[in-house]
Amino acid sequence: MALNSISKESSSNDKRWVIEIQNFFEEEFDDDAHDMPVSIFNVPKAHKAIKPEAYTPQLVALGPYHHWREDLYEMERYKLVCAKRVQAQFKNLEFQHLVDELVKLEYHIRACYHKHLDMDRQTLAWLMVIDGLFLLEFLHAYADKSHSVLASSARMSHLVDPAGKKVAHDSILKDILMLENQLPICVLKKILHVKFSSSDIADDMLPLVLIGICKQVSPLKYVENYPPSEVIENSHLLDLLYHLIIPRADQQQQGEEDLHIKEDEEEANPSTFKYFETPSKTWNLSSRLNVGVIGRLKNLNLWSKLNNGVVDKLKNLTNSKPMTVVHGMPMNIIPKVPALSPIAPLGNFLPSDVKEAINPQNSANDSKSPSVEEILIPSVSELCDAGVKFCPGGDLTTIKFDSKDRKFYLPVIHLDSHTEVVMRNLVAYEALALSGPLVFARYTELMNGIIDTPEDVKLLRENKILVNHLKSDKEVADLWNGMSKTIRLTEVPHIDQAIADANAYYDSTPRVKFCRLMKKYVYGSWRMLIVLVTVLLLGLMALQSFCSVYNCHRVLNLNGQTNVLH
């Protein structure tokens, strides 16, 4: 019986797959749907291992990722109540018509999700209708009542509370801001178009609702006059919130600054970049081209023999005892050894594939243990003790350290019960969806670096940089110290410059210089001091033992010297 059920299930899955493929090729090809960027991701397990509840919905599931979770089924009846109320309010609204309209957007919807959606088009469309209507009803609480078309539902009043005082409301608010729980804005737009039978009303109302909630939940300063036409061009609510905090123009400017800095570094140190990179790049490029002498060698099957011969000779050379000793040395030590300094630059001429062939173990170790970048910067308390004053600034682009006036400018941030969920999901979305510099992630790393204790939080609060709506300063310190590392490393020029300037000023203060000298010459030589003190104590103990057996005054003739003095 079990085998028959498995075979029947497999057969039904095969038929379903064939039907989906047939439907795909029978429909007209939509370039817009297939060119849409993926914007709704599963957060990597390693990233949400520290605090999974900040990335996984706890009360309500929106979209397909968490729809089938049994522990979230309780909220399904509220979704259905919301849908029935909307149908009663709009007499001409037929759910099947709305579902049919969303079926036409099937490939647009699927293109938004990074994960494969294992459900048919009708199931997906119904899911989007129910979840979309519920989300719009919830977001309606943040809309300007004078421009609102819908009225709040009495049955939803215990959930929808713009003052944020209800526990259920706060839980739902956290859930709808999670990356894995996002709904495409194109779905909300289509639902409003069908509801109001007017694209103008829908296009006016949707930006108002979305901007309203983003203003309420944004922990940082946002763009005030964000064009309504650009609001509905964003992928989803979290994407809109991100671009309200970090406009696209700022991201592009950061990327251009990063590129210019790298070009300036190459021009300032040509020997460091071009001199050593060119041979390696030439080797790699020539091995992939089928032109000139290289092409003839390839056609004669001589290139692989030549390449293997070079590698074999290099292997034999590196396996010799002298080279084994050299190979075990760090690369920064080899140039300092007079006999080995002439061969130090040779490693830079070898391409990566030859290095891996010569010593694959090192390559494997490098890939398994990537470097982890940590911000090394004094805490708020340490900087304040060094004479630094923290001043409130504007948005994230205004972060800077003024060495002349000893002022550190940071944006004002508001912290409440849902701020941690917002920040964690913004960091995850930025790393997964955007290819430019991770401005928001770098900001969280900076705050993580300067906040160590509740005293640091207190100082930022007193300087009006941090507005705390949580229970205590300790809770804020734990929040920042618990922020996980970013998914990938990044460089943000203006933030990195502020960190470098703060470190340079702090290191130049007399107190820090004195402490580091003490650490280097006193604390650093503690072993020698212990040996000296031990020898001194042993000498004194030996002298005491000697004097207890013999008369030290008589042996050392101390009495005679004493009489002479008298």
Image (spheres, rainbow, N blue to C red):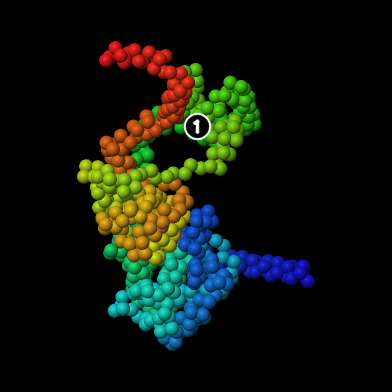
State left or right for residue 524 relative to residue 563.
right
Q: Is residue 324 above or below residue 234?
A: above
Q: Position of residue 464 (x, y in %)?
A: 26, 58
Q: Residue 472 at x, y = what percent?
A: 36, 61
Q: Label 1 sits on what residue type? A: Ser
User: Badge 1: few (under 14), some or many (20 or more) residues near its Cα, within 10 Å?
Assistant: some
Q: Position of residue 393 (x, y in %)?
A: 26, 54
- Closest to the observer, 219 or 7: 219
Q: Nearer the viewer, residue 443 or 545?
A: 545
User: What secondary structure is marked by label 1?
Assistant: helix
Left or right: where 412 falls relative to 485: left
Q: Residue at the location (50% across, 32% down)?
A: 280
Quickly name the residue at label 1: 280
**Foreground residue, 409 or 199?**
409
Q: Quadrant of the C terminus?
A: top left
Looking at the image, residue 504 lies above or below residue 144 = above
Considering every residue shown, the one lying at the far right of the view is 1
* Residue in the image at 42% along x and 77% along y: 159
The quadrant in which residue 468 appears is bottom left
